[in-house]
Image (tube, rainbow, N blue to C red):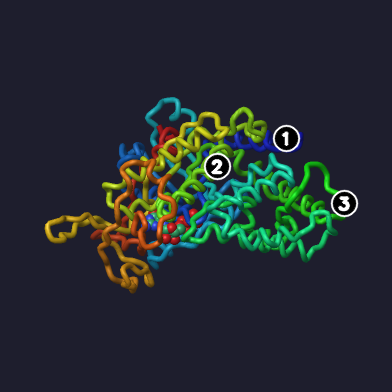
Amino acid sequence: LTTFTDEAKIALDTLADRTSALVSPSLRLGVTGLSRAGKTVFITALVHNLIHGGRLPLFEAQKSGRIARAYLEQQPDDAVPRFQYEEHLKALIDDRIWPESTRAISELRLTIEFESASMWNRMFSGGKLSVDIVDYPGEWLLDLPLLGKSYSEFSRDSFELAQLASHRDVATDWLQEAAGAEADGPADEMLAQKLAKSFTAYLKAGKADERALSTLPPGRFLMPGDLDGSPALTFAPLPGLSDGKHRPGTLAAMMERRYEAYKTHVVKPFFREHIARLDRQIVLVDAMQAMNAGAAAVADLERALTEILSCFRPGSTNFLTGLVQRRISRILVAATKADHLHHESHDRLQAIVRRLVDRAVSRADFSGASVDVLAMAAVRTTREATVTQGREVLPVIVGTPLKGETINDETFDGKTETAIFPGDLPAKPDSIFEVPDRPTDDPAIRFVRFRPPKLERTAEGITLSLPHIRLDRALQFLIGDRLA
Ligand code: GDP
C-alpha cells in the first residue's frame, strides 16, 4: 500500500487541509457505526441542537453562553455528497418518522461562532470553528484490514470465519457452492457471479436482525454505494488456495484480479481521502441489539470494534501507520438508543460499553488516542414513569410505539402512548459475554421502536429543539476543547 503516490497524495491533502485551516480553523469529525447504529439520527440531532440553542448543560461553551451562533455553510469537498440535514430533520420533526439511514459517505459543514475564553484563540481564530462532519458506513472501515492481505489470505480467513459456530449455519449454502468451484478451472463470468451472489447472501444473512452479527468484509458487498454490479464487487473467496501467483486464465486469477481492483479502486481511495484526514471520531454501537442476540453477537461486536479502533490509530506494526499523517486524537464509542432504558440502567449500559472497548483496545494494534465511552440517545423518544403492581412499584418508560410494533400480542397503531417495562441490564458487565444464545422470547431488554417525540412549542410559537440523553457530553468530548 505504501507506494510513493499514495503517500504523496496524502501528504498533499494534509498540506491543503492545514493551509486552509490557517485561514479558517476547522475540525474534521468522523461519524461511523455499523448500519442502523444511529448515525443519521445523531448528526441531525447534533446539528439541530447547536443551531437552535438546545438544552446542552454539559457542553461548556453553550452553558457559559459563549456561543454566539451556529449555522451551516458550504462544505469544503465538492465531490462528496452533502448530508441531507433538512430532509432528515423534516422527517423527524414534521412527520415524526425516522429518517433514511446512511448508505454511503456524506458531509456537512457546521460553523460555530463563539467567544473564546483564551486570549490566544481570540487573536488567532477570531472565535470561529468549522466542524466538517463526515458520515460514513462502519462496514467500509472493516475493509481496511484487507489492504494488508493477499487474495489467498482473504480466502483462507473467510473460510475460517464461516466455520465459527455462530456463522456456520448461515454460511452452509455458500460453503457448498464454493466447495464445488475449481480454483484452477477456467475463468467463468457466470460462475464468478454465482459465487459472489451466494457469498453476499451469506454476509447479509449474518446481519439479519435476530442474529445481529457484525459485518465481515468486504463491506461494499453489503453497502455497495454506487458500485453495485461492477466487477470490483463480483468476486468471492475460493477454497484450497496456495500462496503465490495464480495461473493466468484460471478462476482464481480472475477473482484475484477483482479482489486487487477492489482494494485499489475502493478501499485505498476511501482510506486516503477520508479516514486519513479525520481529527476526531465517534463510533456508534447498538450494544443492546447485540446483547439481545446473545454472546456470539457480542463477541462479533467486540471483534468489529477491535478492527475499527486499529484503523484510527494504527500501532507501530500496523501496515496503515505509514499512511496516517494527521492523527485522530479523540475517539468516542457511544451506545445509542439509551432512551429504551430506564435511567437507572444508563450507567450499566455505559459500563458494558467500557468493558467492550477495553477488551478491544487491549487486542487492537492501536497506539494511544484518548478513547471515551458513553451511553446516550441522540433523540429521546420516551419519558420515565412508575407503575404499581400489587405492592411493587416498577420503573417504566412511556412512548408512542411505531405503527405495527407488537409486544405481548398487542399491536400498536402508531398513535397511542404506552408504558413499557424495559427490563434490566446486568449489573456485572462481563455477564454479557456468557449468555450463549438468547431465546427471542426472553431478550435482555424489551425493545419496541418508538416514534420520534412531539416537539413542544413555546408561547411564542417557537419549536423547542430535539430532546436527547447525554448528547451534550458527546459534544463536549468531541469538540469542547476547540471552543475553549
Ligand atoms: P444509521 O444506519 O447508522 O444511519 O442509523 P439511523 O440513524 O438511521 O438509525 C437507525 C434507527 O435506529 C432509526 O430509524 C431509529 O429507529 C433508531 N434510532 C437511532 N437513534 C435513535 C435514538 O437516539 N433513539 C431511539 N429511540 N431510536 C434511535
Q: Nearer the viewer, mark 3 or mark 2?
A: 3
Q: Identify the element where label 3 is drawn.
A: loop
Residue 377 percent coordinates (x, y): 37, 51
What is the CA distance from the residue labelled 1 to the residue labelled 3? 26 Å
Quadrant of the drawing holding the N terminus: top right
Q: Amino acid at mark 2?
A: Ile
Q: Amino acid at mark 3?
A: Pro
Residue 169 percent coordinates (x, y): 57, 59
Of residues 359 and 434, which is closer to you in this image? 434
Q: Kindly tell me whether residue 85 is visible in this rendering.
A: no
The residue that disc 1 covers is 2
The residue that disc 2 covers is 308
What is the CA distance from the residue labelled 3 to the residue labelled 2? 35 Å
Residue 97 percent coordinates (x, y): 41, 66
Of residues 212 and 11, which is closer to you in this image? 212
Ranked by sequence position, the earlier of labels 3 and 2 is: 3
The verdict on label 1 being within 8 Å of ligand 1 is no
Circle number at residue 248: 3
Disc 2 crowd rating (10 Å Cα; few below 14, some 14-19, many 20+) is: many
From the viewer's perspective, tell me whether residue 245 is left or right of residue 283: right
Q: Nearer the viewer, mark 1 or mark 3?
A: 3
**Farthest left residue in view:** 391
